[in-house]
């Protein structure tokens, strides 16, 4: 399971996925652009990744769900 990042569906239902999340998955589920999510990552606004696969950071669903809840406007 850790060696594979699955592409998520868009929208709030994606927050229930048990898979690992890459930057594009976070963008798709939150409705933000890939560039915006990358900006959050490089500015230190995303939580630390749960794992790095190759050179790609990935997060568990619970980590991203908590980040989304903490940053709702």
Image (spheres, rainbow, N blue to C red):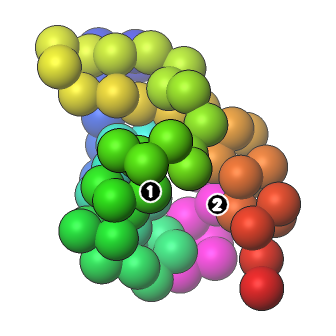
Give yes or no for residue 12 being in the magenta stretch: yes
Q: Residue at x 56, y 27 (%)?
A: 48
The image shows residue 72, relative to residue 48, as above or below, that is: below
Give yes or no for residue 64 being in the magenta stretch: no
Disc 1 designates what residue? 40
| Residue lying at the far front of the rendered structure | 43
Q: Residue at x 34, y 59 (%)?
A: 39
Q: Quadrant of residue 3?
A: top left
Closest to the observer, 40 or 15: 40
Q: Residue at x 34, y 16 (%)?
A: 52
**Disc 1 element:** helix
Closest to the observer, 60 or 57: 57
Relative to residue 58, is residue 14 drawn left or right? Answer: right
Graded by Cα atoms within 10 Å as few (under 14), some (14 to 19) or many (20 or more), the crowding at tag 2 reads: many
Relative to residue 27, is residue 70 drawn left or right? Answer: right
Q: Position of residue 40 (x, y in %)?
A: 44, 56
- Say which of marks 2 and 1 sits in front: 1
* Highlighted range, magenta: 11-17
**Residue 33 in sight from this viewpoint:** yes
The image shows residue 59, relative to residue 7, as above or below, that is: above
Disc 2 designates what residue? 15
**Alpha carbon separation for disc pair 2 and 1:** 18 Å
């Amino acid at each position: 399971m850790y060696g594979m990042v699955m592409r998520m569906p868009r929208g709030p239902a994606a927050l229930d996925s048990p898979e690992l999340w890459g930057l594009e998955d976070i963008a798709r589920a939150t409705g933000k652009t890939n560039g915006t999510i990358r900006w959050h990552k490089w500015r230190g606004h995303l939580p630390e990744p749960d794992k790095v696969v190759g050179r790609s950071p990935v997060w568990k669903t619970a980590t991203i769900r908590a980040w989304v809840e903490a940053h709702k406007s």
